[in-house]
Image (spheres, coloured by chain):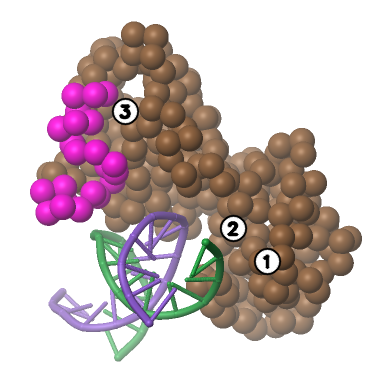
Chain colours: A brown, B green, C purple
DNA sequence: TCCGCGCCCCGGCCGC
DNA sequence: TGCGGCCGGGGCGCG
């Protein structure tokens, strides 16, 4: 599942291959066409396939950024710049290849849904097994409200201060800490896996309410979140489920997770407890996390 | 107006 | 080996 480290890795992987490439055509899969003809919007959101297909031609990719779990392709045509927003959902993956045979794993090759053809002959390909991902053309980033409320990026200079201020918002006071740190308004990009790990490392029970945490503990937690996200980036992301980088490779972080998906606690050997917190399946050790 | 809940989108994969 | 049911990020509708 792509969270911040995985999306950051995709961004870094794509960057050297796509900057300066000009889009000459785009092709959507039969499944995307079917979905749109039924009045749904699988993958391509906010406009029709026909509209997008005409609009995107002749745009040149100028850059790529990550914001929380969103990828933002900066594109330009006739000195007018726009954006292509991508969210990987649970199983989205981008590839830059010369032919579809370049996608070596059949489960990704058989779920290719968008192909951008470049003037150079290369292709930028989006594959998404479960089609939970999102692709959206934006004239301005402010046009898309989910982007506007995103909290601090964990590696921003003022992130700690803003994170602590976020926890201080009254509506969060009585909520379980896990639910709050997974809220992108409080901190960007921390999903179920990394929230679980940060709380385990910080020895904090995921159901602990925010008001029952000391300032010291909140600060400590912030640093654990940053550290575990950084470790995820360094390890190339975690390939729980279907994450793959631009070269089709799995990451290594799944082997470094100490609590997510575990049956026993690596610190004390207790049986790991599972519970739904804020609507998400959660793992924790009742002995180590208080 | 805000909140919480259930539902929906999907296909891989688990367990019977 | 076959098949029904579960899982999950995030948006949406409803009460």
Viewer-nearest of discs 1 and 2: 1
- Relative horizontal placement of residue A46, taking residue A11 as reference (left or right): left
> Residue A244 at what x, y percent from top left?
43, 44
Q: Which residue is mark 3?
A: A124
Q: Looking at the image, can residue A169 be seen?
A: yes
Q: Earlier in the sequence, mark 1 or mark 2?
A: 1
For the point 76% across and 60% down, the residue is A168
Q: Which residue is mark 1?
A: A172
For the point 48% across and 26% down, the residue is A64
**Which range is magenta?**
A35-56
Q: Earlier in the sequence, mark 3 or mark 2?
A: 3
* Cα–Cα gap, marks 1 and 3: 41 Å
Q: Earlier in the sequence, mark 1 or mark 3?
A: 3
Q: Secondary structure at mark 3?
A: strand
Q: Which mark is residue A183?
A: 2
- Relative horizontal placement of residue A107, taking residue A261 as reference (left or right): left
Q: Looking at the image, can residue A6 be seen?
A: no
Judge whether residue A37 is colored magenta.
yes
Viewer-nearest of discs 1 and 3: 1
- Please tell me how crowded label 1 is: few (under 14), some (14-19), or many (20+) other residues with Cα within 10 Å: some
In the rendered view, tell whether residue B16 sits above or below residue A35.
below
Q: Secondary structure at mark 2?
A: loop
Callouts 1 and 2 in the same chain: yes
């Amino acid at each position: 599942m792509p969270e911040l480290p995985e999306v950051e890795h995709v961004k870094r992987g794509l960057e050297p291959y796509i900057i300066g490439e000009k889009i000459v055509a785009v092709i959507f899969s039969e499944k995307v066409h079917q979905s749109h003809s039924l009045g749904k919007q699988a993958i391509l959101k906010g406009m029709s396939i026909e509209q997008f297909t005409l609009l995107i031609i002749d745009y040149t990719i100028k850059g790529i950024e990550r914001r929380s779990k969103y990828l933002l392709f900066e594109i330009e045509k006739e000195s007018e710049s726009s954006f292509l927003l991508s969210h990987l959902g649970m199983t989205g993956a981008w590839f830059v290849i010369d032919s579809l045979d370049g996608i070596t794993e059949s489960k990704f090759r058989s779920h290719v849904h968008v192909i951008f053809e470049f003037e150079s002959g290369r292709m930028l390909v989006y594959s998404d097994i479960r089609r939970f991902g999102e692709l959206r053309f934006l004239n301005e980033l402010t046009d898309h409200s989910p982007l506007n409320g995103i909290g601090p990026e964990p590696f921003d200079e003022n992130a700690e201060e803003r994170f602590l201020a976020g926890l201080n918002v009254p509506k969060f006071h009585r909520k379980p800490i896990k639910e709050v740190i997974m809220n992108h308004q409080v901190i960007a990009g921390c999903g179920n896996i990394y929230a679980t790990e940060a709380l385990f490392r910080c020895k904090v029970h995921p159901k602990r309410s925010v008001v029952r945490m000391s300032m010291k503990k909140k600060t400590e937690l912030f640093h654990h979140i940053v550290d575990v996200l950084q470790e995820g980036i360094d390890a190339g992301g975690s390939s729980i489920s279907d994450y793959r980088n631009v070269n089709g490779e799995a990451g290594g972080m799944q082997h470094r997770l100490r609590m997510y998906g575990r049956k026993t606690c690596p610190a004390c050997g207790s049986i790991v407890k599972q519970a739904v917190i804020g609507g998400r399946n959660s793992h924790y050790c009742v002995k180590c996390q208080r």
